[in-house]
Amino acid sequence: MKIGPKYKICRRLGERVFAKCQTTKFSISGSARRPGQVRKSAAPKTAVRPGGGPRPASRRNLSEYGSQLLEKQKARYTYGLGERQFASQVKRYRGEVALYQSLETRIDNAVFRLGWAPSRAAARQAVTHGHILVNGRRVSTPSYSVRPGDKISLRPSSRERPLFRDLDERLKDYQPPAWLAAPAIGEGEVLASPAVGESELNLNFGAIIGFYSRV
């Protein structure tokens, strides 16, 4: 997915939707303001810019449509999907729980959740380059959906790749979410379907579905 400057997107959405925004620079710059927070010197601004999404300075006055748009953009950038792909996902999984689980159980997200990659973008690249196995078979499609009972592993010949070389150190104190288990370095298992609320962002999937019901 081609995107614009990541700091600007994080500022506009008021959330750290990219790994790049999880930095001291992002926090110190004042970019990490929460929705509704306004700089004292900021003048009132229009709630929604045409094609540009809500402005951070006026989120507390957003219309219902503006709030739904904001949630949609946060989710889309969080999971790294293009607009067409994300819209298709929403239309296919209309329920809030079903939509959340369909996004969380993508193999690229599962690899990220296991801690094998520092971002979903890096996890997606690992999948497309053929480094990930599911039940012993290579999977190269990031949208592949894992299910309870599936075993996820690194391809043995990929373990010395730069992305995975220091997994022992990186995973020393890491705990994956409850729906995943990591019995050994480079091995994972899907224990259950993910429960709503286990995402690092408090996304409102009802608002997302509401947004697409308008269009």
Image: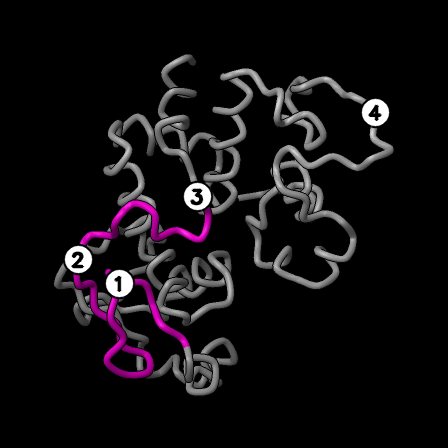
89 in relation to 109, above or below: above
Q: The disc labelled 3 sits on which kind of residue?
A: Asn
Tell which of 157 and 6 is nearer to you.
6
**Mark 1 → mark 3, Cα distance in angstroms:** 17 Å
Q: Which mark is residue 192?
A: 2
Foreground mark, 2 or 1, reads: 1
Q: Which residue is mark 1?
A: 178
Tell which of 91 and 24 is nearer to you.
24
Q: Which residue is mark 3?
A: 202
For marks 4 and 1 on the same chain, the one whose residue lies earlier in the sequence = 4
21 in relation to 161, above or below: above
| Residue 9 locus on image (x, y percent) | 65, 41
Q: Is mark 4 in CB contact (under 8 Å) with mark 2?
A: no
Region of the chain picked out in magenta, as a range: 174-201
For marks 1 and 3 on the same chain, the one whose residue lies earlier in the sequence = 1
**Mark 4 → mark 1, Cα distance in angstroms:** 44 Å
**Mark 2 → mark 1, Cα distance in angstroms:** 8 Å
| Residue 139 locus on image (x, y percent) | 28, 61
Q: Which residue is mark 4?
A: 43
Foreground mark, 4 or 2, reads: 4
Q: Is mark 2 in CB contact (under 8 Å) with mark 1?
A: yes
71 in relation to 183, above or below: above
Q: Locate residue 98: give its quadrant.
A: top left
For marks 2 and 1 on the same chain, the one whose residue lies earlier in the sequence = 1
